[in-house]
Amino acid sequence: MNKTGLVYSSRLRSALLCVTSLWILAILAILAAEIVTCYLNGTGFDNGIKRTITVDISLFFPYFIVAAFILRILALRLNLFHSLRKHVTTPEHQPPAVLSPIEAGLLVDNRFTFNEIAATIKNLELRGCISITQDGINLNIQWLDTTGVNDDELQFLSTLFKQGDVFSTADPASKATFLAASHTLVQRVRSRLVGEGRLSTNSRFYQLTGIFINVLVVAAIIAQLHFTIDAFLPTSQTFNIGYPRYAMNASEPIMEVCVVVLISIIGLSGFRRTALTDSRGLKNWHYVAGLKMYLEKTYKDRFYRDGQQMATDSEMRAFYPYAIAFGIERKFENRLRRALSVD
């Protein structure tokens, strides 16, 4: 679940998920306390043992497990951010040289997205390899220097500039040429990351897993809304003791305690300190997740303000392409989309 998208979610979504998870777990605590108290007091419970265990296992247990894993991922996000703050210090002020913006974007979602290509173009401009000028809605890109350009970028630029040293979005064939070069670039980079063991071969399975997790989260939120509304209705039975009472078996409170312990372990395991480096150095999803959170916290809406560049040139070179790749900054991506008429 760490790499299905939740750990890369925005701060607002993370806050909403956190509130939802805590409210779900509050219901768990209430239900567990009611069952244990009824058993200890010898008053029985308002459901028979068969119904209690069936409902818990088939409905509430999966529901609470989803909440526990969400809390685990939120805890992991917090750990990654604090770890990255120690790694990307003010004196260094640089992301790893081994990790390009397009690689960072692919490690997030393992699929082609336009913001990764926009990040590559802006990165090449900031490195002095190309220049970009605007003529109305159109963009003119000129090839300046190949120094420091890797093989993937070189093939991308060669395809882009096959008609000359200037690529203009005013050309009717510019969109097709640009997208063809972009898809080739993404395929080359992704194949290399798969070969290095940094990405899974089956990107479709990766995407379907992410969709499945999101469906579970939405289902949990819908169920939570039902419980919340029901709790405030005058005829609510959610937090009331019903009758008749049924004799209880020790397995009922034991099961509730085990569920609470299991969910606590799952949630708290996210607070275990996660290193940003592994056998692959900093070119891994741990670092990418932390870097995305760092940029959201430190640079969101601070690269440009009121049409003026607020960040320093060194900050722009270091972090702006990654902010584009992560979808944190969309100004340049939107300009490129409009120039190419890409939806």
Image: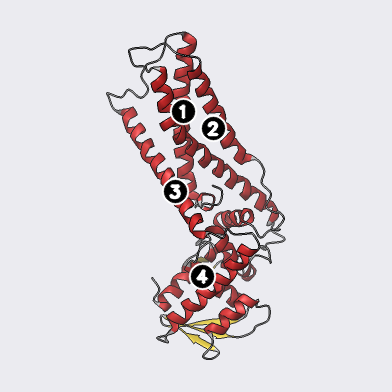
Q: Mark 1 highlights which residue?
A: 28
Q: Earlier in the sequence, mark 4 or mark 1?
A: 1
Task: Name the residue rendered at 52%, 51% in the picture.
Answer: 4
Percent coordinates x, y for residue 204 in the rendering? 48, 58
Q: Nearer the viewer, mark 4 or mark 1?
A: 1
Residue contact at pointers 4 and 3, CB within 8 angstroms:
no
Give the amino acid type for the residue marked by disc 4 in the picture.
Gln
* Quadrant holding the C terminus: bottom left
Q: Nearer the viewer, mark 3 or mark 2?
A: 3
Label 2 residue SS = helix
Q: Tell me the tag on residue 263.
A: 2
Q: Earlier in the sequence, mark 2 or mark 4?
A: 2
Q: Mark 4 highlights which residue?
A: 308
Residues 184 and 214: in front is 184
Q: In whole angstroms, how far apart are the C-alphas of marks 2 and 4?
A: 48 Å
Task: Name the residue rendered at 44%, 83% in the picture.
Answer: 174
Q: Earlier in the sequence, mark 4 or mark 3?
A: 3
Q: How many marks?
A: 4
Q: Earlier in the sequence, mark 3 or mark 2?
A: 3
Label 1 residue SS = helix
Q: Earlier in the sequence, mark 3 or mark 1?
A: 1
Q: In whole angstroms, how far apart are the C-alphas of marks 4 and 1?
A: 50 Å
* Position above or below: 327 against 267: below
Q: In whole angstroms, how far apart are the C-alphas of marks 3 and 1?
A: 23 Å
Q: In whole angstroms, how far apart are the C-alphas of marks 4 and 3?
A: 42 Å
Left or right: 152, with 52 as reference point:
right
Give the amino acid type for the residue marked by disc 1 in the picture.
Leu
Q: Earlier in the sequence, mark 2 or mark 1?
A: 1
Q: Nearer the viewer, mark 2 or mark 4?
A: 2
* Position above or below: 323 against 269: below
Q: Mark 3 highlights which residue?
A: 212
Residue contact at pointers 2 and 1, CB within 8 angstroms:
yes
